[in-house]
Amino acid sequence: MKIKPVLQKTYFRTFLLLTTVLICSMIPFVYFLSAEFAKYTMLEVRSNSQNEVNNLASKAEMIFGNLRAYGLSMYADQNIQNWFFSTSEDPLINHAALVAQSNFMSTEPLIQQSYLINLKRSLVVDSKTGIVRFESFADQNMLDRVQSFHRQYLRFFNHSRDGLDSLALILPATPEKPSDFHLVLLIDKPLLSKLLFGQTIPSEQDLRILDEQGTPLLGTSNPSLDEQLYPAGREHPGSGFQVRLPHQRWFVHTAKLNVENWTLYYSTEYHILTARISLYQQKLIAYTLLLLGIVSTLFFWSSRRSLRSITFLSEKLKNKLALANAAPDAKPDIQWINDSIDMLLNNVEQLHASMRDQSELVRTEFLAQWMLHGTPGTQSYKYIQTQTKLTSCNVLFLAVLRIEAYTDFCERYDFPSRKLIKYAIRNICEEVIGTGSYAAEGLDMGGDHLILVIGGHEPDEPQLQRLLEEAHEQVSRILGIAATVAVSNAYDFGANFRNVYHHISELTLLRFLNGEQQIFLENDYEEFMAGYPSASEALETTEIIKAIRRSRPETALLLLRQQMKHIQELPYRDCKLNLTYFTYDLLKNFNKSSVLHEISSIHQLLERYSTLSDFQTWLEGIVTTLAAEAEAPKSSSRKEEIVLEIKEYVDSHLQDAQLSIEQVADNFSFSVSYIRQLFKEIMNMSLSEYILQERIERVKEKLVSSQLSVLEIADQCGFLSKGHFFSVFKKSTNLTPKQYRELNGNSSG
């Protein structure tokens, strides 16, 4: 048989075509990818450098703050004070002062030397030489500085003695007027530099701290940078910049030390930043060429053996799968493969359907959608009427059960345990209410409360109130959980339960007004609000609460004091009413804070203070503590638990189109900035990205598992506008919702 030339064979021509297309498409892409990677990496490196310099600045401020505090403690020592105020030469007092000074010096290695200067008696206690008179004191420059009054209280400065540089700190008795008694601390600059910047600094890096005049204080000294670094820093305040030298190029990042008005400079040579990027680009090109060779070989092998592979696959499917009514060898291989794949897809669809048939998940989703949207959609209403205990009910009540001291509850139980306890509370309430003529469906909305949707045949509120009281007692007795319960009036299925839910949830906070355990009704809130003072009479709390949430205690205290001036001249009754409602607003907005859990009754709280100034002092302390809690750091395990609770809250409120980071922060009584930072730290993605991602995943699930229209699904998943929904879905999947549904096999819809 005559052998045809290799180039005329189909498999070889196919191999050449595929290899050419692969090379023409991959090489430009790899070059583009390497360039983008280099750009992104440089941005990341510079961002990391800025973070590092910020951390070093924070560390420096903390060390300087500790030194100040240490100096103040040393200054306030009783033995040292006795020496300062002694009017005669007393050996015991002198010895006690020397011992106290020595003790303080031995516990802080950064303090190189210290002086106790008594201008009245012209004496100095030198930590190295003992007690000397002014004329015998070795450090006359420091003595001259102390004797000339400077208004720089607790400020560090450069000081030289015997050719040795150090940082000095002078602590007078008062910051605003001359004093006769001074404590001087000389800080070991080399040791402080090692503590801040490490034992050794590479030659490719330059770390230094300069004062406001550009004088070097701490760090390395690179002569090539000395002349240009400070002027360049003044031209680019608060941002990274470059310094170009004849044979070098430096990237510089700065950070302010606000207390001292100094600047930390962190400089890195450019070639250090780019060396690894260039090496990565070279490796990427080399690996790409290697990959091209491997893929080309695979193309050649695959094209040559494609027909045999198809036959092999057909035989394997025949042996593994038993198709009904299929005679051996009655169909071609392609038909065998097609029928086998159809059977596999049917099996997968059945398995997927069985997994979806989880009644509890479906129940939770439909009830949550109902509560968050206000009115049930078509599918939700159908499910409620056919699958829940509310089927034959004529009227509906909405009850909210809020767990008291929720912060302590979270500290006592981990996240899985809290879920189980909430599930037990729901079962107890459903069981107790179900013993009467009512039906109840419980729902955990995440956070500190549960919802009970209660159905009845007639609006018999006294009987329902008795059942709720019994359920409350059972929860307290069996689980040891203290809770507050509020219930709405009777409504029909057409009511807007979103508004009812928010109203009843706020109603549970009324327990703080009298400290009594009771079932709160809607009328209780109306009666309470009837006595609320008008806007012109009441304390304005909005700006104070904003300042607390933003962790600005000074602003909050200033606003509080301004508001307290407005009621000082009011009659006692009006004054007490204003204070009651101001405290209630604090409790309502910061109900998760442990500092407020001890308050069982506002009226009893007011009775404890006989004067307005006493109560104002207590109130200022509470405001300061709340502001500090807004940004308080959490332990690693507690942070993860908080993020789990945030995820649970988001997952249960995805249907809510108004869901926002502010709403999440308000639910957990943290500031918006802290919620953003915490979620980013644990999840490596922003909370906004997570909410959008979860909504897209839920849309995907509903597109495959339901027959709802695309717009109905978008509405159930919390998308406000059609355009926004189609845009983010296409960006996430590169498909339209219709294409995604068709591609994932929802042919029955």
Image: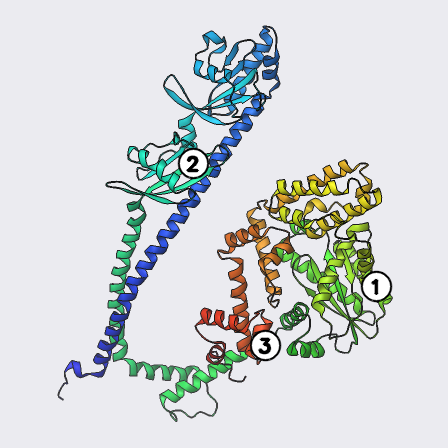
Disc 3 marks which residue? 712
| Numbered disc in front, either 1 or 3 | 3
Front residue (pair 103, 140): 140
Element under label 3?
helix
Label 3 is placed on what type of residue?
Glu
Residue 558 relative to residue 439: left or right: left
| Numbered disc in front, either 3 or 2 | 2
Is residue 233 visible to the viewer in this orientation of the structure? yes
Disc 2 marks which residue? 263
Label 2 is placed on what type of residue?
Thr
Residue that appears at 80% across and 38% down: 609
Going from N to C along the chain, the mark reached first, 3 or 2, is 2
Going from N to C along the chain, the mark reached first, 2 or 1, is 2
Q: Which mark is residue 295?
A: none
Front residue (pair 64, 435): 64
Front residue (pair 429, 213): 213
Eyeballing the image, is 64 above or below 568? Answer: above
Q: CA distance from mark 2 to mark 1?
A: 66 Å
At which x and y percent is residue 39? Answer: 34, 55
Residue 136 relative to residue 576: left or right: left
Q: Quadrant of the rendered structure where residue 380 is?
A: bottom right
Disc 1 marks which residue? 465
Crowding near pointer 2: few (<14 within 10 Å), some, many (20+)?
Answer: many
Eyeballing the image, is 16 above or below 651? Answer: below
Q: Quadrant of the rendered structure where residue 50 is?
A: top left
The structure's colour scheme is: rainbow
Front residue (pair 57, 724): 724
At which x and y percent is residue 292? Answer: 26, 67
At which x and y percent is residue 223? Answer: 29, 32
Answer yes or no: do the residues labelled 1 and 3 have beta carbons within 8 Å? no
| Numbered disc in front, either 2 or 1 | 2
Crowding near pointer 3: few (<14 within 10 Å), some, many (20+)?
Answer: few
